[in-house]
Image (tube, rainbow, N blue to C red):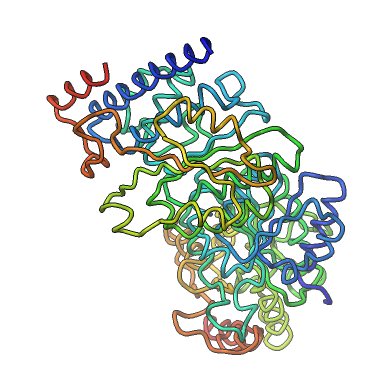
């Protein structure tokens, strides 16, 4: 119990560090997907620090777990986590979105630690399903994870992949929905309603759980329970807050890809200290 | 001439799978059209059915390939290179997953089924995407070699062919061609085992005009060359440009250097395919040979069988013969 508390404390500190770094590097680059990166960073924190067997040391090993970020635009969150794990020096992020930098606004394999180039929405889940199927065929213990955006679920290709993963009983596959309920134009419910998303996913043959996407202990326990049902792929509906952690950004649409002013930057850093 | 290139593809793949457990075929309810039912029966663990979902077909294939599977994604060319174009661009080419995309019943193979089932755009769209080899084999020999080489490739490749019966080999030794043994025949001899991706193959030697063709456009060129020799004593060279990208610019420029007129022939739109690729090479190298692109015009394609459509647009032996006589006037 005491150990669990210690782990949680360390993870909480990491979440704060990651949020500060997201803001820092987006502020420096004057570009980035701020709100969504703050929305998914706790999920990435738990996946990379608690759940997945992946590190700079095993990154070329076929037996590593795989993570593909389907909502590629929130790459800043992924960059700060990978830097913290030692995949590359954190200072590299000073080149974020600069001329000839590898650290562009979507994930690419040119950055150590990134599995697949993403950015077009509705691609990650199919790739992950192929990876999970290959692992099954090879009788490997590899697990495959992806994070999807809520707006992204309007892409029909996701539903092709959802059907496929259930058909092939890919219980080594876990999809996480970053359900912050906002997309670039407005709320999901105004742009293209998702509800009842859990029932839809269950009807497609997935084992579904709801989780507070910012509760590190809950996220950790949920991922450790995978597969939620043997023979079914696992779907985590992570209820999140766009812009989480910075008061003036939370649930405010303009922070989808807003860049803070100097004054806003200082305020964010104070709040995340 | 009893088998199609499609059947040779299936047979070659089965031969490869006998000794290579990593060979994996992914189909979109297309194993029948792809002549892959025997493959599925013999290697049930090495075939993955996706259902009619081409975007997922290419995405899943990318994931499989990233895990080391030698993945052949097989679907009608019309759907594979249109419905799932973004997956080809991003998941295969940009992410550099070595998927082998196989476009079956390409061009106007599904003649009477109409434009929905024709692929006259595939060279054009794929040529504009970085990191993909584009191949249209002409005969059984080229098909089998292309498939074997594709299996070992570590970068993406697209191979397309039709379902009409094609010859085992279209190659004619210089001695088989009257008046064809010119200076450029040196080194060909009896050797036909010369297939390399990115290298065109001189199938027939000639001195007055050069056909540069790909896929099932090569056969009518060979037939036309025969007709022209027999009826008009005109000597035509035929080159199979089986690899549309990367293009064999050296062979194209060598052939152009004689000053002979050039006719390109392809089962593709005249826009963006082999013809325009060859034209670009010629113009940028200062070659001003007489030049004609034969393909499908920018129009609603006429209905009919593949042979009827070829004939309608002058892609038959007779039609090409007519073009040669016109260009040599």
Q: Looking at the image, which residue is at 73% across and 49% down?
A: B151
Frontmost residue, A242 versus A120: A242
Q: Looking at the image, which residue is at 48% across and 30% down?
A: A219
Residue B309, can we see it?
yes
Vertical order, A129 against B293 (above or below):
above
Q: Count how many numbered circles sit on residues in the image.
A: 0
Instruction: Please state, as top left, top right, bottom left or bottom right, where the C terminus of chain A lies in the image.
Output: top left
Vertical order, B321 against A127 (above or below):
below
Residue A117, can we see it?
no
Q: Looking at the image, which residue is at 33% across and 32% down?
A: A38
Question: Percent position (x, y) of residue B209?
Answer: 60, 73
Frontmost residue, B112 versus B219: B112
Vertical order, B218 against B93 (above or below):
below
Frontmost residue, A31 versus B282: A31
Question: Percent position (x, y) of residue B129?
Answer: 48, 53
Q: Looking at the image, which residue is at 82% across and 51% down?
A: B16
Q: Is residue A241 rendered to the left or right of residue A131?
A: left
Question: Percent position (x, y) of residue A197?
Answer: 46, 53
Q: Is residue B136 rendered to the left or right of residue B82?
A: right
């Amino acid at each position: 119990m005491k150990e669990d508390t210690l782990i949680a404390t360390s993870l909480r500190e990491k979440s704060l560090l990651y949020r500060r770094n997201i803001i820092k590097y987006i502020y420096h680059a004057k570009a980035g997907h701020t709100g969504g990166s703050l929305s998914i960073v706790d999920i990435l924190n738990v996946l990379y620090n608690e759940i997945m067997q992946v590190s700079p040391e095993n990154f070329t090993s076929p037996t590593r777990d795989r993570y593909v970020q389907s909502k590629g635009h929130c790459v800043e969150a992924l960059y700060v986590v990978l830097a913290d794990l030692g995949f590359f020096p954190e200072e590299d992020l000073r080149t974020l979105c600069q001329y000839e930098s590898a650290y562009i606004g979507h994930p690419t394999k040119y950055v150590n630690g990134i599995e697949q180039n993403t950015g077009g929405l509705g691609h990650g889940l199919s790739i992950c399903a192929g990876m999970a199927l290959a692992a099954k065929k090879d009788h490997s213990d590899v697990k495959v994870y992806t994070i999807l955006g809520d707006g992204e679920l309007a892409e029909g290709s996701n539903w092709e992949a959802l059907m496929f993963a259930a058909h092939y009983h890919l219980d080594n596959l876990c999809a996480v929905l970053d359900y912050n309920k906002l997309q670039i134009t407005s709320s999901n419910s105004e742009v293209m309603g998702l509800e009842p998303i859990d029932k839809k996913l269950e009807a497609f043959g997935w084992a579904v759980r709801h989780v507070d996407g910012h509760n590190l202990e809950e996220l950790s326990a949920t991922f450790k329970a995978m597969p939620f049902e043997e023979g079914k792929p696992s779907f985590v509906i992570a209820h999140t807050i766009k812009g989480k952690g910075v008061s003036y950004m939370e649930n405010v649409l303009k922070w989808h890809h807003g860049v803070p002013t100097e004054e806003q930057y200082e305020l964010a850093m104070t709040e995340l200290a | 001439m009893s088998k199609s290139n499609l059947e040779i593809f299936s047979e070659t793949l089965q031969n490869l799978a006998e000794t290579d457990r990593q060979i994996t075929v992914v189909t979109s309810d297309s194993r029948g059209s792809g002549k892959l039912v025997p493959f599925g029966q013999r290697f049930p663990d090495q075939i993955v059915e996706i259902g009619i979902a081409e975007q997922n077909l290419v995405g899943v294939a990318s994931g499989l390939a990233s895990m080391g599977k030698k993945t052949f994604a097989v679907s009608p060319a019309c759907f594979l290179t249109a419905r799932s174009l973004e997956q080809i661009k991003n998941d295969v080419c940009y992410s550099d997953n070595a998927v082998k995309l196989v476009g079956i019943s390409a061009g106007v193979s599904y003649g009477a089924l109409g434009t929905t089932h024709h692929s006259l755009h595939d060279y054009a769209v794929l040529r504009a995407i970085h990191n993909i080899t584009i191949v249209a084999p002409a005969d059984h020999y080229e098909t089998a070699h292309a498939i074997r080489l594709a299996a070992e490739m570590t970068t993406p490749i697209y191979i397309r062919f039709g379902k009409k019966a094609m010859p085992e080999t279209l190659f004619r030794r210089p001695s088989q061609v009257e008046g064809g043994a010119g200076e450029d025949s040196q080194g060909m001899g009896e050797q036909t085992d010369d297939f390399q991706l990115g290298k065109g193959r001189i199938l027939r030697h000639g001195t007055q005009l050069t056909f540069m063709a790909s896929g099932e456009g090569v056969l009518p060129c060979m037939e036309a060359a025969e007709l022209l020799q027999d009826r008009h004593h005109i000597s035509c060279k035929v080159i199979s440009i089986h690899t549309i990208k990367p293009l064999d610019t050296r062979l194209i420029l060598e052939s152009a250097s004689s000053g002979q007129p050039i006719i390109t022939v392809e089962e593709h739109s005249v826009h963006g395919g082999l013809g325009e690729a060859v034209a670009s090479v010629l113009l940028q190298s200062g070659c001003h040979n007489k030049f004609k692109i034969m393909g499908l015009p920018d129009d609603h394609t006429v209905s009919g069988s593949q042979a009827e459509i070829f004939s309608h647009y002058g892609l038959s032996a007779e039609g090409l013969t007519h073009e040669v006589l016109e260009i040599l006037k």
